[in-house]
Amino acid sequence: MRFIKRWHRLKVVCSGGVMLALLVACSHQQPMEKLQFPADESFPFLTLEKTYTGKVDEGGSWGSRLQRLLAGDCPQMPLHRPTGVAVDARAQIFVVDTELGRVLRFSGPAGDCHEVTEFGMDVLKMPVGIAITNEAIFVSDVDRRLIQVFSHTLQPTGTITHESFVRPSQLKYDDVTQRLLVVDPPSHQIFIFRTDGTFMAALGGLGTAPTQFHFPVGVDTDESGKIFVLDGLNRKTKIFSPELAWLSEFGTYDRTPGSFGFPKGIAVSSDGYIFVSDAAFGNIQIFNQQGALLYFFGQTGWQQGEFMLPGAIGFDDQERLYVVDQYNNRIQVFQYYAQP
């Protein structure tokens, strides 16, 4: 049986093979129970791989670091209100913390005691969404009504603005069309930019027609460049071509599986399935592109695999699904498996 393991390590700069061997021998690991969805199936949809709550290296002398390492201690800085998550090409995880006005970058070994760098506090007021390209990091700021741009050295380099921005929130970079998509719920639109900030188009407007939205809350794209918009108060997922033509939609308001209560986040897997987080149900639902419910997992709660107001969700290039578990102040990471 494969277990999810929690490795307690601390980054210590030293030289010599003897010390390296000591660090390996003394690092702590605590096996965790594997969670599989569905349970006891030969071909699960997902397994829970990891939970991020925020941990930082507090510094100190070389001796104090070694002492903390041998004790298995992992200094912690909790997330306060995570709202956005993205992963870069180096598999570093970036988490937006709205309440504290910052972004956390998790790096280091594939274990539980990551080195964490925080940035953006000097320029961000109320960050919400994040998207990453090879050249830049984009963070939406609803209070300043703009997109703040950072370099990969975490320095602010510019902004993207639009006169119709009200509260720009969730972001998506589509590497097929090389466009940045900006969700602005109160304006009922998706704004589309080039990564240099050039405005290209706006999708939507208030209404119930196929090409209109009522408080959109999320957006994602697939490997062909199709756009999937989670239309929050219309309780629908709407699908558009890369040229912004309406293709199809599904969804209805109800309290039963396959419907939407309070949808918050959307992500599309590499095999084309649509994942939707729903804060009313405390779960994630999986649909095909015709709107048929394939499976749902999670429930309201604080245990592993449960959620309290699940929000933004997204995949990395290794088919790991990142769920912003907002009121539990954490990010839960699930490994998704394409179905045979």
Image (cartoon, rainbow, N blue to C red):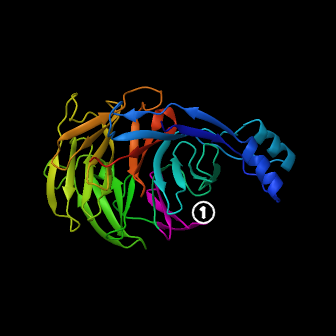
Question: In the rendering, at what x and y percent does residue 93 appear?
Answer: 53, 53
What residue is rendered at 60% in x and 45% in y? 111
Question: In the rendering, at what x and y percent does residue 147 appear?
Answer: 45, 61
Camera-nearest residue between 2 and 78: 2
Residue 336 versus residue 163 in the image, above or below: above
Quadrant of the rendered structure where residue 164 is? bottom left
Q: Residues within 10 Å of mark 1 (few under 14, many from 20)?
A: some
Question: In the rendering, at what x and y percent does residue 175 appear?
Answer: 37, 67
Amino acid type assigned to the residue bearing label 1 in the image: Leu
Please, what secondary structure does the residue beneath circle 1 have?
A: loop
What residue is rendered at 34% in x and 53% in y? 184
Camera-nearest residue between 179 and 213: 179
Camera-nearest residue between 121 and 58: 58
Please report the bounds of the magenta region as a residue range. Answer: 134-159
Q: Is residue 80 visible in the rendered structure shown here?
A: no
- Residue 146 part of the magenta segment: yes
Residue at the spot of label 1: 154
- Position of residue 201 in the picture relative to residue 208 (left or right): right
What residue is rendered at 62% in x and 56% in y? 122
- Residue 166 part of the magenta segment: no
- Position of residue 255 in the picture relative to residue 196 (left or right): left
